[in-house]
């Protein structure tokens, strides 16, 4: 028995996504990863529509049961925070409509889960993602690697909740 | 011939909405107004789901062809900007899926259109909304009055585009 988890790293022009299978006890398997890109020349509404359609396609293809997604903080990337938050709202709505169980995690929680250190450097987190999922290389773009990290954080959080 | 316009004032716990008919040449008629409220005890995803369902209900009931919505700025209400932007993303997505033509307006543009002065006080804008739409009183809550102001701004913008 495994639980399929979708990891999401919401961004401005790129939304990273990853699919993993969680077999419990820290055993996870990489299934797929990628990113949703939208054109900056399009309107906000058109870009949000594309993000929703691509998200629904991923859910239809891989049928995840749960989703891990990064939380946003207003003091981070102030100039793009509105665009990122609008995209995150759409992703949360689509997840709710797909009946996914949703876990939200701070960047600190993600780094802690993946690298054992909430203040780990980005490169260190990405190297751990490569190791954890037995990948030949760090996934590119960064957004996809970050999505794998969030998916792993969600699986680790599931273990903790089960133990507690 | 008239064009039915939906005005939206996106907020944290409350989304103001208004429906007006635009007969051209500055002639407008109030049809309905109200607000979408969500419970702060619920998760982000559940609240966004409620906003989407209520928005779809309004569109199904009144069948607007166009939508005017306020733009957000990151220097305004920093602590709630993420929640408001997430809701705004959902509203834009639902408008796109309902094939509404969308106009986005700054608070300055809305005040200019309604009160003839981009720096008008809130009370002044609300009094003008009451006058423009021949209402017995200023609509409550404020969010609904603001939504009527945005709807009127969109109708005024349509006139300008036609003349230009």
Image (cartoon, coloured by chain):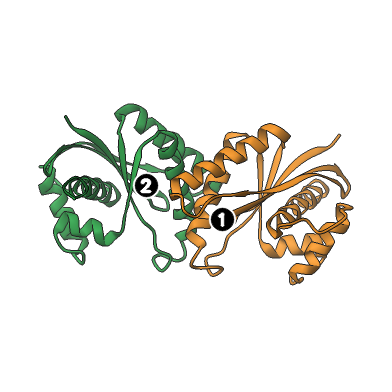
Chain colours: A green, B orange
Q: Chain of mark 2?
A: A
Q: Residue at x 13, y 53 (%)?
A: A128
Q: Residue at x 71, y 36 (%)?
A: B65
Q: Residue at x 74, y 68 (%)?
A: B122
For disc 2, the marked residue is A15
Q: Secondary structure at mark 2?
A: strand
Location of residue B89 in the rendering, given as x and y in whole percent from the top left corner? 52, 48
Location of residue A134 in the rendering, given as x and y in whole percent from the top left corner? 10, 42
Instruction: Identify which residue, A106 or A86, lies in the foreground.
Output: A106
For disc 1, the marked residue is B13
Can residue B141 be seen?
yes
Q: Closer to the camera: disc 1 or disc 2?
A: 1
With B62 as the anchor, is A151 left or right in this view?
left
Location of residue B51 in the rendering, given as x and y in whole percent from the top left corner? 56, 44
Q: Count neighbours of disc 2 (C-alpha within 10 A) and say few if under 14, some if 14 to 19, many if 20 or more.
A: many
With B159 as the anchor, is A64 left or right in this view?
left
Q: Secondary structure at mark 1?
A: loop
- Tag 1 and tag 2, C-beta contact below 8 Å: no
Q: Residue furthest top?
A: A61
Q: Residue at x 58, y 60 (%)?
A: B72
Above or below, B25 against B142 in this view is above
Instruction: Identify which residue, B126 or A33, lies in the foreground.
Output: B126
Distance, label 1 to label 2, CA atoms, is 26 Å
Mark carried by residue B32: none
Can residue B18 be seen?
no
Q: Chain of mark 1?
A: B
With A98 as the anchor, is B133 left or right in this view?
right
């Amino acid at each position: 028995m495994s639980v399929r988890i979708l990891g999401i790293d919401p961004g401005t022009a790129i939304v990273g996504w990853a699919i993993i299978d969680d077999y419990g006890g820290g055993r996870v398997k990489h299934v797929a990863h990628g990113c949703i890109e939208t054109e900056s020349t399009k309107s906000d509404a058109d870009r949000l529509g594309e993000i929703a359609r691509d998200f629904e396609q991923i859910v239809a293809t891989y049928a995840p049961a749960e989703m891990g997604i990064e939380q946003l903080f207003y003091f981070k990337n102030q100039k793009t925070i509105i665009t990122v938050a609008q995209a995150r709202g759409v992703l949360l709505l689509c997840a709710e409509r797909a009946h996914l169980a949703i876990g939200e995690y701070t960047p600190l929680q993600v780094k802690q889960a993946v690298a054992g250190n909430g203040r780990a450097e980005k490169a260190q987190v990405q190297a751990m993602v490569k190791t954890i999922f037995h990948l030949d290389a760090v996934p590119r773009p960064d957004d996809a690697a970050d999505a794998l990290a969030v998916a792993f954080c969600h699986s680790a959080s599931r273990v903790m909740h089960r133990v507690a």
